[in-house]
Amino acid sequence: MALVQRALERLGTPTVSVTVARDITVACRPPRAVFVPFMMGHHFGVPGNAELQKTIILAALRLVAEARRSGEIRDLPYTWNLARRGAYTGES
C-alpha cells in the first residue's frame, strides 16, 4: 500500500493509511499513517460502532492537514479491549 500511496502523492494526491501493524508501517514508510492498536482486520474497530469508525476516519483526515513531515505515524488513543466493550461511543 505504501508504494501506491507514494505514487499518488507524486501525482499531487495526499494519502493517509489506517494501520493496525505499526512495525510493518514503520518498515514500509508510507507518506503518513494513523495507528490503532486493534486486531488485524479491524482497522476501524468493531462492526456497528459508527461513532468510533467516524472518529478514526476524521483523525486520519486531520493528519493529512496537520502532518509536519513525510512518514509521520500518529498513534490513536484507543484500545481493542475498550472498543469491544463499546467504550468509544458518542465521540466525534
Image (cartoon, rainbow, N blue to C red):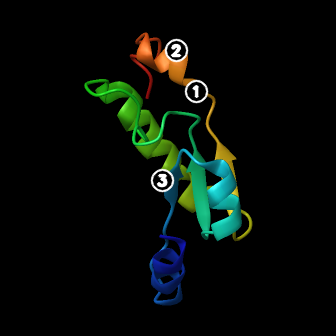
Amino acid carrying label 2: it is: Leu
Q: Are marks 2 and 1 in contact (CB under 8 Å)?
A: yes
Which residue lies at the image location 65% right of the left edge and 49% below the top edge?
Answer: 22
Q: In which quarter of the image is residue 26?
A: bottom right
- Nearest the viewer among 25 and 56 is 25
Q: Quadrant of residue 84?
A: top left
Q: Where is residue 55 in the image (x, y as percent from the top left)?
A: 44, 34
Residue 78: assigned label: 1
Measure the C-alpha gap from mark 2 to mark 1: 7 Å
- Nearest the viewer among 13 and 46 is 46
Badge 3 element: helix
Q: Residues within 10 Å of mark 3 (few under 14, many from 20)?
A: some
> Is 23 placed left or right of 44 in the picture?
right
Residue highlighted by disc 3: 61
Q: Where is residue 78 in the image (x, y as percent from the top left)?
A: 58, 26
| Relative height, residue 34 to residue 28 (above, below) | above
Residue highlighted by disc 2: 82
Residue 67 can be seen, yes or no:
no
Point out the frontmost of discs 3 and 1: 1
| Relative height, residue 4 to residue 73 (above, below) | below
Amino acid carrying label 1: it is: Tyr
Which residue lies at the image location 49% right of the left edge and 34% below the top edge?
Answer: 39
Residue 23 can be seen, yes or no:
yes
Measure the C-alpha gap from mark 3 to mark 2: 23 Å
Q: Quadrant of residue 42?
A: top left
